[in-house]
Amino acid sequence: MTTFASRARVRLLVATALVIAVASALLVVAWPGESAFGGTRSPLGSSNGWGPDSRSPLFYRTVTPPFGDGKDNLVLRFRPHARFRFGFDVHNRGSHPLRIEGVVPAEPEYQGMMRIAGLHFQHRRNAYILEGATSEPLVIEPGGDGFVVPILETSSRCTHGAGESFDSIQLRYSYRGDQKTEWYPLPVVVGMACGNAKWLVDQVVTP
């Protein structure tokens, strides 16, 4: 025989189960798993280091802001139809291999001073250097790091006194069988000046 007390306990258990189910559903929505793509959070972990091709004629200098937690600034001077390389590391924070395949190119109508024309990758283990990097896609194991080398190209001309900068690039990668593009924040701001590059440096160091 079912008593009033037993029916009350059943109702209490059902209500508790519903509360737990709703709370779990809200937690899944508010705290996604490994990448926002395919129901999991991005495997692209933050970058901890970078380095420029200081032998390039485009290289002017590197500037560290004197105040706050701002990024270092890589200052370049414009030369028509020239190339420049810099490298940075990417951490795979996912639980599966991450394959970085390239970069999303700029729109054909883009008329800026510089653009990222492609990526090279360093395949030598623990070698965070530009030399020897190739265009073959880079596979980074879970918990590992890889070195990515953007290839920057300049246009044919610029407006004297103008400047441009960027601090992120749009990577193409595959993860767990899915392909995705994602804006990746660089550990450095890359700036270019048409004419005297000193004014870009002054903008960084002047409070």
Image (cartoon, rainbow, N blue to C red):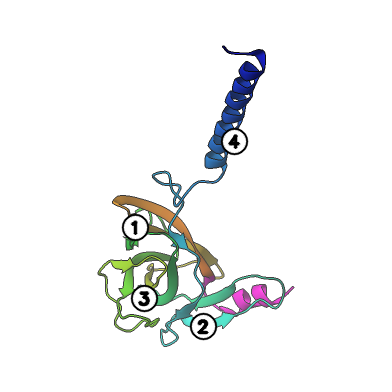
Which residue appears at 32% of the width and 73% of the height?
A: 121
**Residue count near mark 2 (Cα–Cα under 10 Å), binned few <14, some 14–19, many ≥20:** many
The label number, if any, that marks residue 23 in the structure image: 4
The label number, if any, that marks residue 4 in the structure image: none
Badge 3 element: loop
Say above or below: 160 vs 40: below
Lateral position of residue 47 relative to residue 123, left or right: right
Q: Which residues are magenta?
A: 188-207
**Residue count near mark 1 (Cα–Cα under 10 Å), binned few <14, some 14–19, many ≥20:** many
**Closest to the observer: 88 or 27?**
27
The label number, if any, that marks residue 173 in the structure image: 1
Q: Determine the residue located farthest toward the front in the rendered image.
A: 1
**Closest to the observer: 178 or 86?**
178
Q: Position of residue 78 (x, y in %)?
A: 46, 75
Query: Which of labels 4 and 2 is toward the front?
Result: 4
Query: Which of labels 1 and 4 is toward the front?
Result: 4
Q: Position of residue 15 (x, y in %)?
A: 61, 25
Residue occupied by mark 3: 82
Tell me the amino acid under the disc marked 2.
Tyr
Badge 1 element: strand
What separation in Å lies between label 3 and label 2 (alpha carbons)? 14 Å
What separation in Å lies between label 3 and label 4 (alpha carbons)? 56 Å
Tell me the amino acid under the disc marked 3.
Ala
Which residue appears at 42% of the width and 68% of the height?
A: 143
Which is nearer the N-term, disc 4 or disc 2?
4
Badge 2 element: strand
Q: Position of residue 166 (x, y in %)?
A: 51, 64
Which is nearer the N-term, disc 3 or disc 4?
4
**Residue count near mark 4 (Cα–Cα under 10 Å), binned few <14, some 14–19, many ≥20:** few
Determine contact: label 4, label 2, CB under 8 Å.
no
